[in-house]
Image: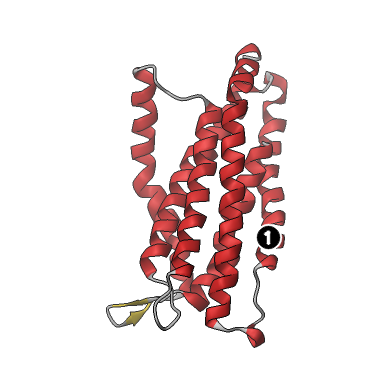
């Protein structure tokens, strides 16, 4: 659940710093039409609908072949994928075109990586709680699981404030540098947390087996 807090704090940047980055810095022109910033949030739902069946079939197949990774590894994958998303956005901000606008493809790839990471952690985490919690505490611990989302959201706002450029001080080139730096640090944080969780996997896996 501690690692889940980190994940939610980072993923909620899609509704804070990344939405501002999209509005101000990303080239949203497509076939002569400027895509409204708010429409990009719907990409998360679209990718979830498209990718959920694939991930479901993947876990079932891995389980049947006895190669299904433990929950902690899936959590690590979620953190590493969301870290990759921020590295992609940082790279896009550093490779902005001559006008200072970031290519739309970087944003789309970021959304795709994020949803893949979420599908490795969110449904898996809820399943983990119901399997490991004592029967009398299942309901309470499911509530605690959702509390991690609330805590992550609160932290997300503080992270976004670090990279916020006031509208009256906004300059496209400077803003790209600020967002590139912020996204790089966020990506590094996710990467380190994901790797640390991988190191803890043998110990945590033994504890999880003992408590079943």
Q: Which residue is drawn at 69% across and 66% down?
A: 162
> Which residue is situated farthest in the bottom direction here?
168
Does residue 172 appear left or right of residue 57 in this picture? right
Q: How crowded is mark 1: few (under 14 residues within 10 Å), some or many (20 or more)?
A: some
User: SS at mark 1?
Assistant: helix
The spot of residue 72 in percent (x, y) is 56, 29
Residue pictured at 67% horizontal, 54% vertical? 153
The residue singled out by tag 1 in the image is 159
Q: Which quadrant holds the N terminus? A: top right
Q: Which of 78 and 93 is in front in this view?
A: 93
Number of marks in the image? Answer: 1
Q: Residue 44: x and y, percent? A: 45, 56
Quadrant containing the C terminus is top right
* Image coordinates for residue 135, horizontal then vertical, percent: 67, 19
- Name the image quarter holding residue 169: bottom right
Q: Residue at x 70, y 43 (%)?
A: 147
Picture coordinates of residue 129 (x, y %)? 62, 28
**92 displayed left or right of 13:** left
The answer, for residue 123, to whether it is visible in the render is no
Q: From what the image shows, is residue 57 above or below residue 90?
A: above
Would you say residue 63 is visible in this rendering?
yes
Q: Which residue is drawn at 66% across and 34% down?
A: 142
């Amino acid at each position: 659940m501690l690692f889940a807090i980190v994940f939610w704090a980072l993923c909620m940047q899609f509704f804070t710093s990344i939405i501002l980055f999209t509005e101000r810095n990303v080239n949203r022109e497509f076939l002569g039409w400027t895509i409204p910033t708010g429409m990009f949030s719907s990409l998360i739902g679209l990718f979830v609908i498209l990718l959920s069946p694939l991930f479901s079939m993947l876990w079932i197949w891995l389980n049947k072949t006895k190669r299904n990774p433990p929950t902690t590894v899936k959590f690590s994958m979620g953190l590493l994928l969301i870290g990759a998303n921020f590295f992609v956005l940082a790279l896009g901000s550093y490779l902005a075109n001559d006008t200072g606008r970031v290519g739309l493809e970087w944003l789309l790839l970021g959304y795709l990586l994020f949803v893949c990471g979420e599908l490795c952690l969110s449904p898996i985490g809820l399943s983990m709680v119901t399997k490991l919690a004592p029967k009398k505490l299942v309901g309470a611990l499911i509530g605690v699981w959702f509390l991690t989302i609330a805590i992550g959201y609160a932290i997300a706002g503080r992270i976004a404030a670090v990279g916020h450029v006031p509208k009256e001080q906004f300059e496209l080139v400077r803003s790209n540098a600020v967002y590139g730096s912020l996204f790089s640090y966020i990506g590094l944080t996710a990467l380190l947390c994901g790797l640390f969780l991988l190191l803890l996997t043998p110990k945590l896996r033994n504890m999880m087996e003992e408590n079943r």
